[in-house]
Structures are given as C-alpha cells and as structure tokens.
Image: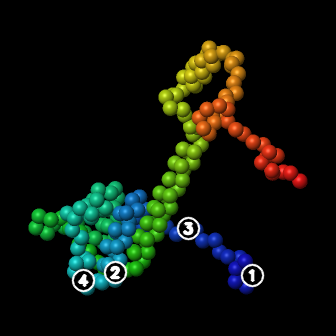
Amino acid sequence: MGYAGYVPAKLPPSSLTPVQTALFLVSSVSSLELIEKLVYNAVVSPQEPKFKKVRLGNPRIKAAIIDTPAALEAMLAMGWQQAQEGEESVLLLSKSLSMAVVHDVQEAASRAKKAAQEAQRTAQRAAAAKPAALPGSDSRESLRAMLEADRRERAARGPVSVGSVAQPLPSAGGGGPARIRTAGEAGLNSG
C-alpha cells in the first residue's frame, strides 16, 4: 500500500534518452568502463582542457571506442565531436556534461556486466547438460561398435579356469620356511 492507504500509481516506463539508447547498444564492458572514466573526468574537472579532448590514435582508446561497435556513436550522442588536430583524429567535448550522464554510463556498464555473466552461466549450463562424449566417439553407431568390440574381446578370453596357488613366505635367513608364531605362542592372549 502506498502513503495513507492509497494505491501506488503505476507509471508507464520512462522512455530512454538518446544517450541511454546509444549506450544500450554498446555491449563491451571494458569500453563502457573507459567511457565512464572519460566522462567522469570531464564532469568533475570541467576546466581541465586535457579532459575535454580524447586522442583516437591512442591504442587503448582505439580498441575501446573506435573498434567497438556503437561506442563512438555513444560518445557523439553525449556531446563529443569528432575533429582533426593536425594529422591526429580526436574527440572534443563541445558542451558541459552532468553527473546524470555518468550515471547513465554506469547503468549501461552494469547492464552489460549482468548480460555477460548471464551469457557465461547459460554457456556453462549448456556444457553441463550436454552428455560427455567418449574420445573418438562421434555418434551412437560408433559407440555401439566400440561396445560390441569390447564384448567380443571379453568372450575371446574365456572364463578364468586357473586358480591361485599359495606361495611359501620367504624366511628371514634365506633358507627354509619362514618362522611364523601365533599370538598364543608369543604369550599374547593368554589369560
């Protein structure tokens, strides 16, 4: 129940902003974490010019933003603009960002982590549910052929017809039978 017995209102789900929509398309957790760091630095220190420019030639930035699908589009949706400085391609921040954008990136990273964990769990469940195959057996027919070959091999051996024979124990001195004493002879168990 809501406040004073009122039924809580069921509001329709809020529509996503363009930034949230762009971030939703980025599935790489490492890319979202790097984007979060870049955006956070730009929000916390808006006067620092180094946080308003991202060099796309940097290998780490290139891997996380340029080579990752939808990551560059997400940066552009947040207000970054692609530009050339000399021979180098950069992203420049054209407007000031708020902490709401940082929270959007954090939420997208959290969603991507959960999706990756769920995909990993699903793969583990699928691997566990799949019956373990014997090495070299690709189908039921080959497994049946292996079982039949084992059956023929056991039949060729025949039953065990030779029993075991008791062997004398070696003596301590090397000659003659071993000297074994019973507990009664040793004085044990005599009441």
Q: CA distance from mark 2 to mark 1?
A: 42 Å
The answer to whether mark 3 and mark 2 are in CB contact below 8 A is no
Q: Quadrant of residue 55?
A: bottom left
Q: Is residue 123 left or right of residue 150?
A: left
First in sequence: mark 4 or mark 1? 1
Q: Which residue is mark 4?
A: 48
Circle 3 Cα neighbour tier, 10 Å, few/some/many (<14 / 14–19 / ≥20): few
Q: Is residue 11 left or right of residue 54?
A: right
First in sequence: mark 3 or mark 2? 3
Q: Is residue 2 visible?
A: yes
Q: CA distance from mark 3 to mark 2?
A: 28 Å
Element at label 3: loop
The one of 64 and 69 positioned closer to us in this rendering? 64
Q: Which residue is mark 2?
A: 43
Q: CA distance from mark 3 to mark 1?
A: 23 Å
The answer to whether mark 4 and mark 3 are in CB contact below 8 A is no
Q: Residue at x 61, y 32 (%)?
A: 175
